[in-house]
Image: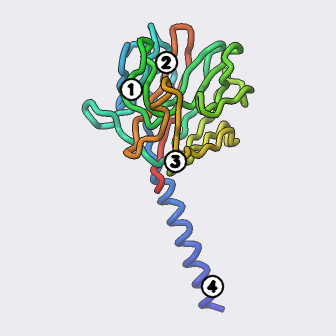
Amino acid sequence: MKPAINLLLLLVLVLTTHSARCQDQWKSLFDGKSLKGWKSNLYPESFTVVDGAIRARSVKDRVHLFYVGDRAGEFERFKNFELEATVRGEPGSNSGIFFHTDLAVRDAMNHLANGYEVQLNSSPTEIRKTGSLYAVVDLDKSPVDETKWFKVRLTVQGKRIVVRINEKIVVDYTEPEQLVRPPERAGRRLNPAGGAIALQAHDPGSTFYFKDIRIRPLP
């Protein structure tokens, strides 16, 4: 019996070590007290740290806060990854989490030209609800009360994009090989080289908060 017991103990040790290594792969993107590692493309005063969370409220048009890490100016690129954030919004607010994006804009309102957006919205008039993969897979009903803290988990692996809200899958989308978008959404696609993570401050009347932001790479 001893060889079997030893084999079992070895298997448990291997699985425990593998699990610990997977946990160690998580990287925190926000220290809870400063905007270190983040840079806005416009109007930096639109982003502040309040009570341990990033507050996003634009002073004018659309503005985005990019994760740059230790890089001096260029944003950090992420290709296959799992991203988690705990968020909440004030009533009647609009925001989003962008990924596989960059600094290019497509209009005078400073909408980002490239990549995808996970919609965050507490406005009763907005037809695209929280958790939507904006203008690609739109939800017509919000899965949460956005005025209370909730978790967003985004998984990007290969061509597959999965959005979870409070651990419930609300979007499971695979980008087709022959992708055709309307001209105004031509850049809404995955970048083979990966792209930036960015938080949106939508307008002066919208306020969203982000904390516990972390990411881990996937093969």
Q: From this viewpoint, is residue 30 visible?
A: no
Viewer-proximal residue among 8 and 137: 137
For residue 5, which numbered disc appears in the image? Answer: 4
| Left or right for 151, reference 73 | right
Viewer-proximal residue among 208 and 51: 208
Number of the front mark, 4 or 1: 1
Q: Is residue 157 above or below residue 207?
A: below
On the image, numbered disc 1 is attached to which residue?
35
Give the Cα separation between the discs numbered 4 and 1: 51 Å
On the image, numbered disc 2 is attached to which residue?
201
Identified by mark 2, the residue type is Ala
Of callouts 2 and 1, the N-terminal one: 1
State the image coordinates of residue 127 (x, y, percent, origin top left): 68, 20
Mark 3 falls on what kind of element?
loop
Give the Cα separation between the discs numbered 1 and 3: 37 Å
Of callouts 4 and 1, the N-terminal one: 4
| Left or right for 45, reference 121 | left
For residue 177, which numbered disc appears in the image? Answer: 3
Give the Cα separation between the discs numbered 3 and 2: 32 Å
Mark 4 falls on what kind of element?
helix
State the image coordinates of residue 116 (x, y, percent, origin top left): 51, 33
Viewer-proximal residue among 200 and 57: 200
